[in-house]
Image: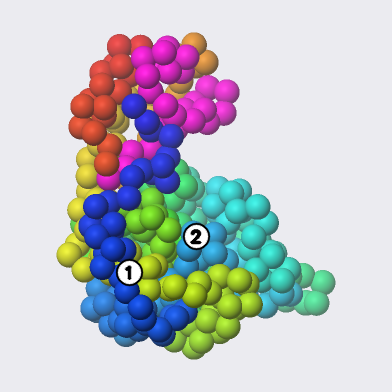
Amino acid sequence: MHFLSDNAAAVHPQVWRALHDANAADTPYDTDRLSRALDDSFSALFGRDVAVLWMATGTAANCLALASMVAPHGAVFCHHEAHIENDEGGAPGFFTHGAKLVLAGGADARLTAESVAARLDAIRDDVHQVPVQAISLTQASELGCCYRPDDLAAIAEIARARSLRLHMDGARFANAVAFLGCTPAEACGPVDALSFGCVKNGAMNAEAVVFFDPTLADVARRQRKRAGQLQSKGRFLAAQLHAMISDGLWLANARAANAAAAEIAGGAGARLLHPVEANEIFLRCTADERAALRTQGFGFYDWGPDAARFVTAWDTRDEHALALARALQAL
C-alpha cells in the first residue's frame, strides 16, 4: 500500500490512449498539430489568452519559467520550504546562470504579504545587494496547504508595486483547484507564469508552463532549446497535456487524490501537523509507530525524527486509504 509519492502513480489510461493516437508522423519539435493547439486549449481553461510550452519535468518547468523573468545578477523570492530551494539540486541557479534564491517564512509553507514586504524592505537598493526580480509561490504548498485568492491578490499587489514578476510552482495545482472549488484563474491569481503540473496527476512525462505574458514565452522558447529541453517528438508531450485538460481529467484525478487524503486525515486526529487541503498528510509519528505501520504494508517517507509524510494519488485505492486511516486510529 504505497503512499510514498504521487510521482509513483500509474499513467492514466486516457493518457496512454492519447499517446497511442499521437503515434503518427507529424512535424518535429513544437510545430506539430497538437503542440500548436496548446495555446488555444489552455486559453479556454483560464479564460484569457495564454502561451503554453510543454516540458518533460517539473524542475525544467519551474526553472525555465524563472529564467525568463530573472537576470543572472538577480534573485527569486520564495519560501524556505519551496521545492526550488530544497529539491531541485541547484537547478534554479543553473538555468538562470547564477540568480540567487532569497528565502522567507510563513505557516504551512505559505508566504504572506507581510513576510514578503518585510523581507523585501530589508534589501538595500544598491550594487552590494542582489535585487529581487521575481516571487515564486507554490500552489498547493510543500506542506499540502493552499493559497486563497485573497492571499494571492495581496502578494501580487506588493509585487506589482515593486515591478516584480510572479511565478507559481503548480506541481499540485490541480489538487489546490479541487480543494478551493474555484476557477483555475482564481487559484493562480495574477501570476506571470504557472508551472501546471501533470506528472503527479496521471501524466507520464509532460508538464506545462502557462505564460500569461507571451513575451516571456518567447524568451523561454529559446532557453528551452539552449538547455537541451526541446524534444524532437514534442507531439507526445502535447498529447498528454490535451488528454489531461480536454475532458476535465486533471480535476477528476485531483479530486480522487484529495478524497483519499481526507479519508486518511480523518483517522489521524491530533497527529496532524498541518491542515490537509490537498493530497499530502504530515503526521507526528514515533520511530516505533512508523515501524509498526511499515510492518502492516504501508509505504511512506520519514519526515524528520518524529514525523512521517503520506501522499495519495489519483489511483490510490479506497480500501488502502481506509486501511491506513484505521491503522492510524489503532496506534
Q: Which quadrant is the N terminus positioned in?
A: top left
Residue 205 percent across, percent down from the top left: 43, 58
Quadrant of the rendered image containing residue 274: top left
Q: Is residue 237 visible?
A: yes
Instruction: Using a 10 Å C-alpha cutoff, classify the residue at mark 1 as few (fewer than 14 neighbours), some (14 to 19) or many (20 or more).
Output: few
Q: Which quadrant is the C terminus positioned in?
A: top left
Up the image or down, 214 lies above or below 315; here it is: below
Relative to 74, 307 lies left or right: left
The residue identified by callout 1 is 23
Viewer-side label of 2, 1: 1
The residue identified by callout 2 is 57
Residue at image point 38% right, 47% down: 145
Label 2 close to label 1 by CB (< 8 Å): no
Range covered by the magenta-colored residues:
290-314
Q: Residue furthest right?
A: 128
Residue 53 percent across, percent down from the top left: 44, 75
